Image: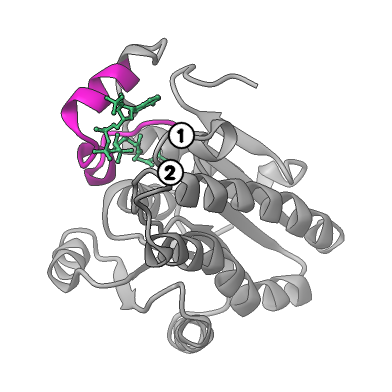
Amino acid sequence: MAKVAIVTGGTRGIGEAISLALKERGHTVVANYAGNEEKAKAFTERTGIAAYRWDVGDHEACLVGCKRVEDEVGPIDIVVNNAGITRDGVLHKMTFDDWNEVMRINLGGCFNMAKATFPGMRERKWGRIVNIGSINGQSGQYGQVNYAAAKSGIHGFTKALAQEGAKFGVTVNAIAPGYIDTDMVAAVPATVLEKIVARIPVGRLGAAKEIARGVAFLCDDEAAFVTGSTLSINGGQHMY
Ligand code: CAA
């Protein structure tokens, strides 16, 4: 059944692929974005998907933004918490701001979006929340204590909220992407990235579409029995 879906960080990279995949499945999709006005405008022109600007790390902005979407588009039944940033660096060089911004946006964003939308899903007895975690939240990564902690937190958040949503028809799942061909991964120094790719059994970076396909599955009506799970899509780089 067609639903209203919101994808945070939904105008670029993995988020863009997710927005398109959900639209292809007949949902009315809204893409949230934080700052890149030009890219968001081009995205809307290209896809016909409305883009709404706010910072998911800002609690109040999420409440106001989601209310606006619900007034203008309809009750939100699907949330994909995809927005995330990196501020990589070894701990002894990492600033408190690097730590705090990654926690505030990557993990705080999931809480803020859930606070804004979960009560409605619970009342309507149907909902899908998909949180984008990371292989680096599962295994850790040199130079990413902030990102790994936030992503690991997302996996815990997912399992806890899944228990709260289960009896109300609200499923909460996570996807743990590996290294995907996006701007975020392109920012990793080439020599470091080369070594990472060499450790991926499939022998390449993933495509954003390969993550989007997993999200679309988890949002499906027929995925009602899948909750609290983490789907790893990483080319075999980390298996557990
Ligand atoms: N394991 C052990 N040692 C390592 C290492 C590793 N994985 N990576 C680097 N080192 C060592 C280096 O060999 C070097 O040692 P020496 O000083 O003895 O030569 C030392 O650490 C410093 O390395 P750098 O010169 O690279 O240090 P830097 O401060 O310039 O940069 C860094 C450190 C920012 C962490 C950089 O190595 C880096 O960007 N790494 C990639 C981090 C990464 O994978 N980020 C993922 C981003 S994409 C993403 O997060 C999406 C997702 O979900 C998967």
Circle 2 residue: 144
Q: Which mark is residue 141?
A: 1
Identify the residue shown where x is 12% and y is 69%.
38
191, above or below 13, in the image: above
Q: Are marks 2 and 1 in contact (CB under 8 Å)?
A: yes
Scheme by which the image is coloured:
one colour
Quarter of the image with the C terminus in it: top right
Q: Tag 2, which secondary structure?
A: loop
Relative image position of residue 65 (x, y in whole percent): 45, 84
177, above or below 117, in the image: above
Q: Which mark is residue 75?
A: none
Q: Tell me if the residue at label 1 has its CB under 8 Å from ligand 1.
A: yes
Relative image position of residue 114 (x, y in whole percent): 62, 70
Quadrant of the image occupied by residue 199: top left
Identify the residue shown where x is 72% and y is 77%.
119
Region in magenta:
178-197
Residue 161 visible in the snapshot: yes
Residue type at numbered disc 2: Gln
Label 2 CA crowd tier, 10 Å (few <14, some 14–19, many 20+): many
Relative image position of residue 23 (x, y in whole percent): 39, 55
Q: Residue furthest right?
A: 167
Quadrant of the image occupied by residue 50: bottom left
In the visual, does 83 lie left or right of 1?
left
Residue type at numbered disc 1: Gln
Question: Whole-Å distance between the Cαs marked 2 and 1?
Answer: 6 Å
Q: Tell me if the residue at label 2 has its CB under 8 Å from ligand 1.
A: yes
Relative image position of residue 151 (x, y in whole percent): 54, 48
Q: Main secondary structure of the magenta part?
A: helix
Label 1 CA crowd tier, 10 Å (few <14, some 14–19, many 20+): some
Q: Residue furthest front?
A: 92
